[in-house]
Amino acid sequence: MGLTFLVTGGAGFIGGNLVRHLLAAGEGHRVVVLDALTYAGNPDNLAAFVGNPRYHFVHGDICDRAVVRESFSRHQPDVVLNLAAESHVDRSIDGPGEFIRTNVVGTFELLDAARTLHGALEGERRKRFRFVHVSTDEVFGSLGAEGLFSESTRYDPRSPYSASKASADHLARAYHHTYGLPTIVTNCSNNYGPHQFPEKLIPLVTLNALEGKPLPVYGDGKNVRDWLYVDDHAEALALVAARGVPGETYCIGGNEERTNIDIVETICALLDELAPTPKRHRELVTFVKDRPGHDRRYAIDPGKIERELGWRPRTSFAVGIQKTVEWYLANRPWCERIAQGTYRRERLGLAAGVRAGGAS
């Protein structure tokens, strides 16, 4: 039986890939996207679904109570997947207010509307309702050289971005314990793949390298992240929505730890093969001043979702990074349309004026 999904932030990178996954599931699902189309929200990510009778788009802000309430009342979702968020640590350092507004207040508005809807549901519809709040591993702070984040890791956010996401996580859990709203929290590692906004490390490096521009790397480039291919994440979120236990948390990771400099050099090597130039792309690497509070290492233990829900990442980093770079090579018009907007691959936040420092 098909369900109605409300995907907030569905015009973003992860959201767009999740919408694609849900509509392709072959179960007659209906997907409603609520997105404010801020700078990182891209209608191109959803263009393939226009005209699909199982897809509906609502242009609106999750902080707008009237829009949120109308969306819940009109579409009566069975599952809410909250991916709407201000992201990127640098931007939060320079302007934390918008992060608190969207990530905390916006999540509250969604939870409260969901509580009203859930309270009016009966029978099977009430039992199957879920609110999946999608969060980040950055809420856990920084790891040392050993160990992994898990569902029991103490929260220790180090930036306004991660603090705002941590606050939203706590709100989602509080609504479960206080009101009985069937919320589930997920914390994922660094996503990568097609359609990612070019402030992030992999598309930023790929596009800069293709244009012969500097490839900025924070500090010594030895910060470590666990990389998760976006299609694998979408599959995990759909599984959590279908089989996850209300009140629980699931950590979703790719088991693919890499340093930032390793990522950059891997992309350079791929471009040397796929788009060769007289000079090797590695020569474009430029080390730039590190950002404040740059966590040294993140890595997730996905053991719980593997044991309890049977999910495992399908895509190795070697396969995923090649598919990603090839996608950007084949979709230059998509990239050019973004460049015609307000973002020019400059370093966001910090008011430093340093060009393109979007390493994670």
Image (spheres, helix red, strand yellow):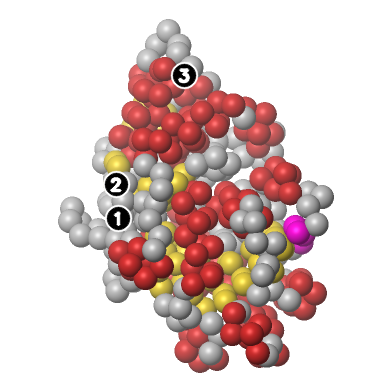
Quarter of the view holding residue 289: top left
The amino acid on which the numbered mark 1 sits, given as a three-letter code, is: Ala
Contact? badges 1 and 3 (CB < 8 Å): no
Q: CA distance from mark 1 to mark 3?
A: 30 Å
> Which mark, residue 299?
1
Closer to viewer: mark 1 or mark 3: 3
The image's mark for residue 257 is 2
228 w.r.t. 206: above or below: below
x 30%, y 38%: residue: 221
Q: Residues within 10 Å of mark 3 (few under 14, many from 20)?
A: few
| Label 1 or label 3, whichever comes before in sequence order | 3
Q: Are marks 1 and 2 in contact (CB under 8 Å)?
A: yes
Kindly identify the amino acid type of the residue bearing the numbered disc 3: Leu
> How would you classify the magenta stretch by its main secondary structure?
strand
Q: Residue at x 40, y 11 (%)?
A: 279
Give the CA distance from mark 3 to mark 2: 24 Å
| Residue extent of the magenta highlight | 54-59
